Image (cartoon, rainbow, N blue to C red):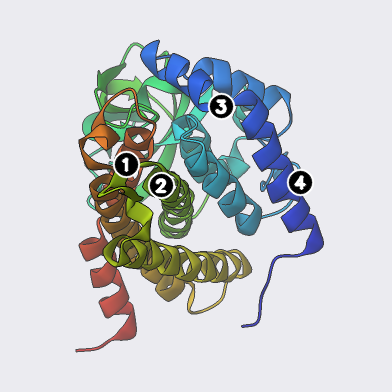
Amino acid sequence: MQWSLSEEQSAYRQALRDWLGDVAPTEAVRGWLDAADHTTFTKRFVADGFWGVGVAEDLGGQGGGLVELALTAEELGRHAAPSASWLATLLAVPALAAAPAARAEVLAGAGAALLVAAESIVPGPVPVTVDDAGRVSGTVPRVLAGGEARFLVVPARGAAGMTLRLVEATDPGVRLARRELLDRSRSVADVVLSDAASEPLAVAAGEVLAQAANRAAVLVAADSLGATERMLELAVAYSGQRRQFGVPIGSFQAVKHAAATIMVGVEAARSVIYLAAASVHGGDPRAVLHAAAAKAQVTAEGARAADTALTLHGAIGYTWEHDLHLFYKRAKLDEWLFGSPTAWNEVLADALALA
């Protein structure tokens, strides 16, 4: 497969980067995190037309596909902007093809729709059951943006096998228990269902979940790329300011090598992520291989780059006053969000039939 960004995609990335520079500078992000309020950014993101980019027009979006979504994820990570409800909704939207009213509501920005899957499972066991009356019960821990839900797309096991069910978060049988994360630019919550009313979604549950897993892998990898690139910029700038033995530490060979290693990882990540995005979007038979490689390799490298950047900064890098910790925590969560590198390497090994 030969693939590169089109002129329109490059222009979109630059437009989004400029917009985020105006709307989400670091001081604004810090204010949202201090207030534990992501809705201010989300409302502006919706109002200025970015929420539906990458969602097909026949689903009510503005067109484009997974490449545009990966561009968006990269820029959100680069600015440490709140993104949990955006990502959770994007993973749920394909399942809402069978629920046009709910889909229209969430794409208009009237609350998020969530695919109720644990943030660490790609995909894994289904802990929710549905009875003959359509009531669902079970607990799913650590659901991305779980406390910001308007609609829940719930995989559930019943007499007919596994299906996807639509549940309104305001139902009396739904309880959302927020959890604290070190990365405060994202949020998770336990979703507890106790005989909650649900409606069936007439979609192929297995296909939707498999596609959601691949999309999550690509988008989290893209987020990690954005955060890593920003950490590299911060480390290079700091190494030109901090002095030892009368010279900037950036003149030391060891520091140059460390920064160069991060840069090589950034460039390699960009290649694998956008190939994977095009592959998954186009239904390439090797899409799961590309998605697994992107998630396993890019997020692991992002976590290593975070440690290197922190070392280059010294102790100041983890203080609240310095910006590095925002991206450090972001990259560390990305390593585990929707599956660790080990889990995705297992997916890769299974798909390659190595044994």
Q: Residue at x 28, y 86 (%)?
A: 353
Check disc 4: other Cα within 10 Å, few if <14, some if 14-19, many if 20+. few
> Considering only order in the chain, which callout, 2 or 1, is on the residue closer to the N terminus?
2
Of marks 1 and 3, which one's residue comes earlier in the chain? 3
* Position of the N terminus by quadrant: bottom right
Residue marked by disc 4:
57
Q: At numbered mark 3, what does the secondary structure look like: helix, strand or loop?
A: loop
Residue at the front extreme of this rendering: 246
CA gap, disc 1 to disc 2?
8 Å
**CA–CA distance between discs 3 and 4?**
31 Å
**Pointer 3 local density, CA inside 10 Å: few below 14, some 14–19, many at least 20:** some
The percent position of residue 114, horizontal first and vertical second, equals 44, 33
Of residue 179 and residue 321, the one placed in the foreground of this image is: 321
Report the residue marked by disc 2.
231
Q: Earlier in the sequence, mark 1 or mark 4?
A: 4
The percent position of residue 349, horizontal first and vertical second, equals: 26, 78
| Image mark for residue 328 | 1
